[in-house]
Image: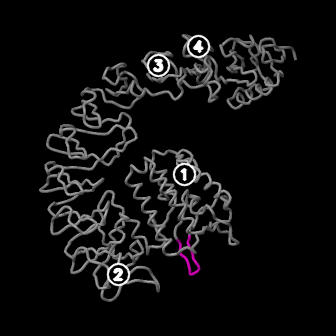
Amino acid sequence: MPELLELGVENPNGGEALAEASHRYPAFFRVLLADAVPTEEDELRASLPAACRRAELVLAFISQHPRVAGDSVLTRYTLGMRQWLADVLNRHGEQGWISVAAEDDDAELTAQELRDDWQALSAAIASGDYEVFCDVAGVVDPEKAVFWENVIGQRAANHPFFWPANADFAGDYLSYKHAHREHSQHPDEQHLGGGLWRTRSDAGFGVQRGTGTDTVPLLPAHFEKISSMGRDDDAALHLVSFRQNGRWGIADCRQAPASILVDACIDELWAYEDGLAIMRIGEQEGLLDLQGRQIIPPIYDYIGEGRDGLYPVELNERWGLRHRDGRELCAPRYASLELLDQHIWVNEQLLPPFFLATSDAGLGLLDASGREILPCAFDEIEWSRSLYAWKTSKDEQFALYRPDGTPWLPASRHDPGDWLIEDVLLSVTADNRVGLMTPDGQLLVPCIHEQIERCDFPPTGEPTLLVKNKNGWMLLDSAAQPLLPERFRQISLLTEYNIIRSHPDWRGLLRVNEKGQDRLRGKLEGIWHVAEPAPRIACNHTAIQPVLLDEPTCLFFLSVRPCQPDEDGTQHPQRFALYHADGSRLFPDDYAWLDNEASGTARELARLVMKLKEYWGKAEAVNALNAGSGQRERLYADGRRESA
């Protein structure tokens, strides 16, 4: 596989390097190159317009996924990628093509594999199947932003949106305002986005549309600085800011010559986001719309990061909330007001943003209308994604509130965790121990356990819980009643076979491990059924494997244990035994070896299982050495045995 991929774009008049990827073939590279054909120069070459159409289809599909739509950073990345591709297509036209060449010649990802990938992706997009899309695109966990970033290219590919090979057009894609606000003035940028280019002369800077011979002058080159106002907002790509006599104004560049929307009267100006731009005149800040109108006049000391048209505002060291239409939702009265950097989903619906407020009495919470749904009286407030509730703490007392601030669980010393059985039991913690609580606040299991977790293998068909204490693991049902006693090192499913999981009796069978004696040096395994008070196969085996026959469907167990000092045939260190699914012996004796195998290692035990399935599936016998008699025997699946 190539160590480095170089993505380039060309047309009959020339080309440019666009990106490099050290992450093999990133998902977005594969989309761009989906119709690529090999060339004599060992390149893969694809049509630029077709590549852009595929990319737009993928980006539109990605942007609708709840994890992406609910994340401002991922949303910004998809918008930035769209802008980048539109600019590339604008520069190189319909005759352009995209190509990639590896530094070494051993490029395993062939053109056919690229087409196969795209066929699967496009089918998933057409059917709206995000599961298939994520599988093909490498989104291992759709809830983690890092995998979506890999698809977009943020981590997997070093392309101009994030780390440019061609800095002339990098300014448009590197300006995302996340933790800190960035100014719109970038004197070194050339391409402003939306087909606009910054020009330069001895007298200063101007703006034109297009490059080369096909250009249209928009602003004369006599301004101190020129910058794009639409780097963070596609709706503002036609707007540029200009500086004259040390102050800033805004021009609309859709027509030639450009029209001045705001004269040069602004001391500081930031790029548009969501149709609004923050400005500063003197020491006060306000908001401008896309027409240059003052939606919020410059009367505040500071305007914070907004979302969904809501902006925290500061005046005289007190914070309030304003709406994008100019309404004051909350007068400045808080010591701080911070946009909660978390998207709240309830019943697959994204709720409007919330704001964390601070006063001398503590933390509180405001909703999107400016209403204080939780009073400023808490030490901590956080959103529980599992419980769909606000969790508060005050003086080590914890409480839960519904999304609208309605009380749910009153304050107590029990710290709520996650649903272990949804709407039935939730975990709570106190004194570093875990217990179980019902939704109405009843402490069903006291906080005395080291660990409680939900089983991913419900053996009864109903939700089941694993509980760990110093004595080992135990199993509880949904009513917190014991299914297995508290003594096991491990409790697990026998196998992933669906036929066992769906069988009315076998589904309740579990492999359990207990601590072995010193001389056995390890764990001891047995088989336990959740509906029975005692094990079906005692925990005195070093390993047990199920043997499942298809026709007729039968389940056996093959076990192995060390030979005891007082047993006959101690020259053979292992003893093998075979059991029915109900725990009864298939053969009454133990065997020193099966099929000439006596090691008893995990690998050899698995090999023996395959051999038994092979022989018994054909009604044939397997050779064995009876450990007690020392005689060789032939063993059949129906329990018959004969001398060999």
Main SS class of the magenta portion in the image: strand
Kindly indicate the quadrant of the structure image that contains residue 542.
Answer: top right
Real-space Cα separation, disc 1 to disc 3, in angstroms: 41 Å
Check disc 3 and give the amino acid type: Asp
Read off the residue under disc 3: 477
Q: Could you tell me which secondary element the residue under label 1 belongs to?
A: helix
Real-space Cα separation, disc 2 to disc 4, in angstroms: 87 Å
Residue 125: assigned label: 1
Real-space Cα separation, disc 2 to disc 3, in angstroms: 74 Å
**Residue 112 vertical position relative to residue 418 in the rendered view, above or below:** below
Q: Earlier in the sequence, mark 2 or mark 4?
A: 2
Q: Residue furthest right?
A: 644
Query: Is 423 in front, or is 600?
Result: 423
Q: Could you tell me which secondary element the residue under label 3 belongs to?
A: loop
Q: Earlier in the sequence, mark 1 or mark 4?
A: 1
Residue 535: assigned label: 4
Real-space Cα separation, disc 1 to disc 4, in angstroms: 50 Å
Q: Which residues are magenta?
A: 8-17
**Residue 75 vertical position relative to residue 39 in the rendered view, above or below:** above
Q: Position of residue 216 (x, y in %)?
A: 40, 83
Q: Could you tell me which secondary element the residue under label 2 belongs to?
A: loop
Q: Earlier in the sequence, mark 2 or mark 3?
A: 2
Check disc 4 and give the amino acid type: Pro
Q: Position of residue 612 (x, y in %)?
A: 77, 25
Please tell me how crowded label 2 is: few (under 14), some (14-19), or many (20+) other residues with Cα within 10 Å.
few
Query: Is 567 in front, or is 210?
Result: 210
**Residue 200 vertical position relative to residue 394 in the rendered view, above or below:** below
Q: Residue furthest front?
A: 255
Quarter of the C terminus within the rendering: top right
Check disc 2 and give the amino acid type: Ala
